[in-house]
Structure formats: structure tokens, C-alpha cells
Image (cartoon, rainbow, N blue to C red):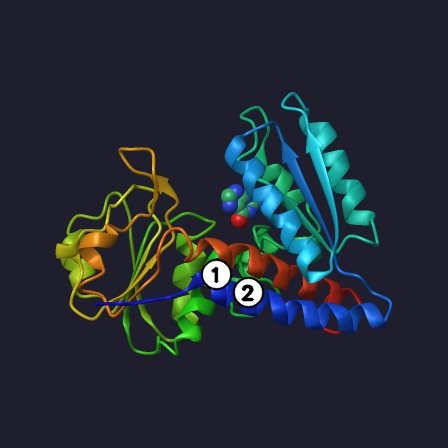
Amino acid sequence: MAKIIDGKAVSAAVKHRVKEECDRLKAKGVTPGLAVVIVGDDPASRVYVNNKKKACELVGFHSEEYALPEQTTQEELLDLVDKLNADKKIHGILVQLPLPKHLDDKAVIAHIDPNKDVDAFHAENVGKIMIGEYSFLPCTPAGVMELLASENIEVEGKSCVVIGRSNIVGKPMAMLLLHKNGTVTIAHSRTKNLKEICLGADIIVAAVGIPKFLKGDMVKDGAVVIDVGMDRDENGKLCGDVDFAEVEPKASYITPVPGGVGPMTIAMLMQNTLTAAKNSINEG
Ligand code: GUN
């Protein structure tokens, strides 16, 4: 029987901490501000953006939403980013991904002022993470580290397997575990002996985007299992990358979907926006 890590409770605690800090900054005349840009009408993106707005209200941030039509041009989007880069009320800029196909997401990310890049997607921030000197951590991997810390789960010396190598989750996740002195393997779709590799792991982070991918026979007794997936099962029901029914009896700790990593992503975005506001007055 695994202990289920309650992402909602940990997320609420992080947001509470951010709100207290926000009140303190406001007393100094600075209100942290986040601008969220969404292009087109992808329903999942719409839900994420609404949740981000609600979280801003909860912690007391100024928030602005820019909902642009599907046919927005690259130039129009870059012009908006320029305007937000120069806006003193805005400390964090988040352009919701994925963008419509005709837009170049890499060029858009490169255009965001790295000091306002609260996703930590800009090459400058990615580079800082590599050398361990960062202001912002990408929200989902940072949320996973917060969940591990909330249960005092030690990473040092542990065998950690990250399944998935995306720029948003897998690669930075591996780096954060490495910074905590974990021994890290990044597995992916071409990995040959995945089952054996997972069976050797003390900590597994599943971020492949395939419903119920991690099965019970891939997990050793007592492993810590973190599920970053947000998938739909064969009945259209929300599920993760981990087959929860099979893995839960073997794991020592496990995160549920929903209610595990998901709520952490937004909490860490609030934290990054707070950091950006502090940095803007050299309080970082
Ligand atoms: N789309 C899904 N997750 C994210 C995220 O963390 N940041 C942005 N900008 N877009 C996303």
C-alpha cells in the first residue's frame, strides 16, 4: 500500500506562502503581475488558462489575459510580447502552448525577456538550470521536487528514472534530480530495456504522455512513483502515465491523477511570478 501524495494540499500550502509574500511586496508598492497569452481556442489550453487566472486572484496578483484569434500572425504575436516585455506592471509572461501550427513557438519563446520568462523555457534560463544557477525552474519539474520534499523523500544517492525527454518536463526534471545528487537515467521511446531500467529505480517520474504506460511489473517494491501524465483512458476518463491500480500496491509513495502533479504546476507558476517581481526590485 502506497502513501498517496496529496498534490492539492501541497499546492495550497505553496500558494499560501506566495500570498503572504505578495502581501508583503504590495505593502512596498509592488504588485506581482502575470500576463497569459492564448492563441486560438484549444479547449484544454482554455481550461489551463482559466485556472491560472483563478490562482492569480487567490494569491493577490495582477493578471492580464490576451486571448488572440487562431489566425494571429507571428508578427502580431511578437509585437504583443514586445509590449509585455516593456510593461512595468507585468513581471511574468506566459504564452500558452501548443500554438497553432503556422506559428513558430521557438521564436516566440526566444522573444520573451528572460527575466519575465516564468515558464523557464528561454534558452538563457535553460542554460542557467544546466549550471545550477537559476531564478526560475520550469513549473512541472519544480512541482515534482516540491512534492518529494513535502514527504521528506531523499533523492541523494537514489536511482532515479525519468521516462520522457521533453524540453518542458523530462530534460529539466532529470537535471533537478541530478542537482539533488540523484543518479539519473532518462528513458524514452527508443529505450530498449525499459522494464529492467525501471525495476532498478528508487524513484520513477513518468512523463511519456501514454495512458497507463507504467505497469506493476515495471516497478520494484517500495519505489516512489510520480505521475506527470494527463491522459484519457479507453473510456475517455482522465488518467495518468501510470497504471495506478497495478502500481499503487507496490509503491511506497505515489501521486494520483488528478490531484497529484497537476495542481503543483500552477502553484509553481505563482512562485516564479513572485520571484520575477522580487527580482525586478533586486529582492531576489
Ligand atoms: N501547455 C501545457 N503546459 C504548459 C506550460 O507549463 N506552459 C505553457 N506556456 N504552456 C503549456
Q: Specify the quadrant of the image occupied by residue 29.
A: bottom right
Give coordinates of residue 199: x percent, y percent. Answer: 16, 62
Closest to the observer: 154 or 51? Answer: 51
Q: Measure the alpha-carbon separation of dots 2 and 1.
A: 6 Å
Residue in the picture at 52% in, 70% down: 132
Kind of element beneath mark 2: helix
What residue is shown with label 1?
A: 8
Q: Specify the quadrant of the image occupied by residue 18.
A: bottom right
Q: How many labels does the image show?
A: 2
Q: Is residue 134 visible?
A: no
Q: Can residue 273 be seen in this view?
A: yes
What residue is shown with label 2?
A: 12
Residue in the picture at 18% in, 60% down: 219
Residue in the picture at 15% in, 52% down: 193
Point out the image quarter for the C terminus.
bottom right
Give coordinates of residue 202: x percent, y percent. Answer: 24, 69
- Do the CB atoms of the residues marked 2 and 1 lie less than 8 Å apart? yes
